[in-house]
Image (tube, grey):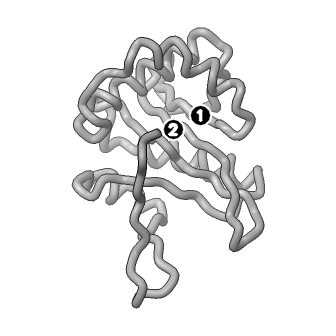
């Protein structure tokens, strides 16, 4: 069976259910926080994403089985005056890890970003997630820095 990666139609009930299934598996993984998605999130998420013109999600399919997910959002690089694409979630079902699914998802995301005229891809990863870091590095991602003397960029957050 050949692996296929397709963009998600958030309004398609089967694709929406598959997105939620994969995202919930990721959320329950220690690298995703270790807790299932809240029911309110499951009810709203795909309808909310369908309303966001700069959202794009991709599912990796092995036959009829969804085995990987990438959720992305387009933003803008002020230094390049071009769009960029942020990979907000990238997850592979645990039973299918180490088989190139993540690389296939990254390739589909990169192709989408290039078609949109994006200057770069961005993502965040936990420093303890060595397998993901190795996969991202293999695809060409590197730590972000402008001047080595200033150090690497660090992602911070503040909940509202």
Q: Residue at x 63, y 52 (%)?
A: 85
Secondary structure of the residue carrying tag 1 is strand
Residue 83 at what x, y percent from top left? 72, 57
The image shows a total of numbered marks equal to: 2
Residue 154 sits in which quadrant? Answer: bottom left
- Where disc 2 sits, the SS reads strand
Mark sitting on residue 70: 2
- x 50%, y 31%: residue: 60
Foreground of the two, 92 or 127: 127
User: Looking at the picture, does residue 64 appear above or below residue 26?
Assistant: above
> In terms of image quadrants, where is residue 51?
top right
Residue 133's spot in the image, x, y percent?
33, 58
Q: Are marks 2 and 1 in contact (CB under 8 Å)?
A: yes
Left or right relative to 114: residue 108: left
Residue 53, x across and y down, in percent:
74, 35
Label 1 belongs to which residue? 57
Out of 82 and 60, give the one closest to the viewer. 82
Return the residue nearer the eye: 43 or 92. Answer: 43
Disc 2 packing (10 Å; few <14; some 14–19; many ≥20): many
């Amino acid at each position: 069976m050949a692996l296929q990666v397709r963009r998600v139609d958030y309004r398609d009930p089967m694709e929406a259910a598959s997105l939620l299934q994969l995202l919930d598996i990721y959320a329950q993984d220690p690298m995703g926080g270790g807790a299932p998605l809240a029911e309110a999130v499951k009810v709203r998420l795909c309808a909310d994403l369908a309303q966001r013109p700069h959202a794009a999600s991709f599912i990796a399919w092995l036959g009829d089985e969804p085995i990987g997910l990438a959720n992305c959002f387009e933003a803008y690089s002020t230094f390049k005056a071009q769009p960029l694409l942020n990979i907000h979630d990238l997850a592979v079902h645990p039973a299918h890890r180490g088989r190139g699914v993540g690389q296939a998802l990254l390739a589909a995301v990169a192709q989408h970003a290039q078609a949109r005229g994006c200057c770069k891809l961005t993502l965040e990863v936990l420093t303890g997630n060595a397998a993901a870091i190795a996969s991202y590095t293999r695809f060409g991602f590197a730590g972000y820095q402008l001047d080595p003397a200033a150090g690497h960029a660090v992602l911070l957050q503040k909940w509202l």
